[in-house]
Image (tube, rainbow, N blue to C red):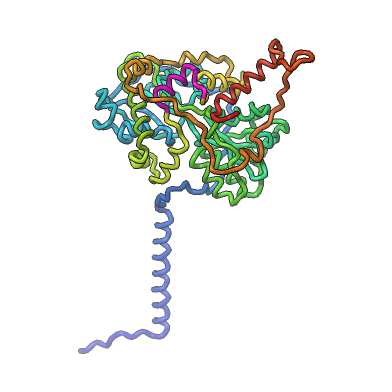
Amino acid sequence: MTMAEPRFTLLGKLVSVVLIAGLITLGAYMIMQRRGSAPSQSTGESPAPSEAPEVAEVQVDVPKLALPAPVQLKDNIVPIEISEYAGYAGLIAANGGLEPNESSVFFKEHGFKVKLTVSEDEDWSELNEGRIAASVTTVDVLAIYGRQFHAVVPVQIGFSRGADGLVVRSDIKSINGLKGKVVATAQFTEVDFFIRYLAQEAGLAINAVSGIDATPHPDRINLIYTQDGFAAGDLFLSDLKSGKNRIAGGVTWEPKMSEVVEQSGGKAHLLTTNRNLLIVADVLVVHRGFAEQQPKIVAGLVHGLLEGNRMVRERPDTYLDVVGRAFKWTRDETKAELASVHLSNLPENLAFFSGEIDEAGSFGGIYQSAIYAYGSDLIKDPIDSDRFLDLKHLQALDKSGIYKDQKIAIAPIRTAASGTLEADPLLSKDIRFLFEPNSAILDLSNQENVVNLDAIKRLLQVSPGST
């Protein structure tokens, strides 16, 4: 018996077509959802923030650090924490990357390995507690934490030369133009110190505010804080794009500075950087107890760092790949970032710590500037900067003659633009000197004259090329 083939009615065909179309649409939707939730591929640029970063709570006191505990080395590996910054290229080059290995300068020359960890978390309790043996920071941070910071400084890493800066709305032309306005930055970091230093030189006081909508002080630069410098740039950019113009600028670091300017659509410009204002100096900080118990390892760290700095200074292109891999930068990005730092050699280190450096800020000078910039309300009981210094390893290298051919080589970085140096002065400050009666001779018995002269000398010293 032959079975008849099934036949579809017109209605059945219509229902089948609708079902098939529905299934195709559902499948396409599910595929797109999975793609949308998958991690995006890196483009080499920081993504634009989907929403404004949160404003951090203003800290009216310096954070308390954990009590000291000893460092326990494992497998002969020294753990060191760094951040995403080209100024640490020498450490990375000397180590051959981030991971501990037997090809590093540290192992071949001194018999120990180093593990570098990239982190933006400035939790100095980790160093105090011995969870890491060493870290990196800037001199101003030492002044903030003072005696509770259980660390020593055996070597300078380098200077930021344009890696930190102030991005502002396009209508603001000077530091004085920020009077009565709100600026975003990150509290107790180098970018906080940078804006405070500039405000101090402009004769302006600082006022910390709790939020974007808080009433700003009309005669001061008003600071709001974010978690870090990257977030400060994002917060400023978000407010700028919203058209609310509640924030006048952001103090941040590269590559965020350039990103904010590029994404502002002409609404923001870079007012100034520390390219020729050498007050942001990076140093290696070593757990104090570890430094006392393991002086040979610290000597190896100092030599390895200086050797890495030499390697990058003399052959930067050779180390673009290893530094770039550490920070997930392209070769071009790494090259651009390296142009914003100065890696210090041995004679520059010796001059930096002795105070004899004429081309940049010294350790003691920057440290004291930070105490002035933050004021007695925050730094209530400052300690002498010498308490942090452990210079015997630098002095031993100097005596060895290993770097006898090195010279101090810090010079002003000039722009390609011709014409006048500045269309508008970065900052202005009224300084009045008193002279002896009916004379052109300055009255040096007047204490105000002495203070003003010292202020001018200090500013010229940290600004190579200034006249």
Q: Position of residue 343 (x, y in %)?
A: 42, 30
Residues rendered magenta in the picture: 344-358
Q: Where is residue 48 in the image (x, y as percent from the top left)?
A: 51, 48
Number of numbered discs: 0
Q: Position of residue 282 (x, y in %)?
A: 46, 27
Q: Is residue 308 left or right of residue 143?
A: left
Quadrant for residue 443, please give it: top right
Q: Can residue 163 be seen in this view?
A: yes
Seen at 69% across and 16% down, the residue is: 449
265 part of magenta stretch: no
Quadrant for residue 324, please give it: top left
For the N terminus, the image quarter is bottom left
Question: Is residue 428 or residue 241 the one in the foreground?
Answer: 428
Q: Can residue 227 be seen in this view?
A: no
Seen at 43% across and 38% down, the residue is: 338
**Is 28 rendered above or below residue 39?**
below
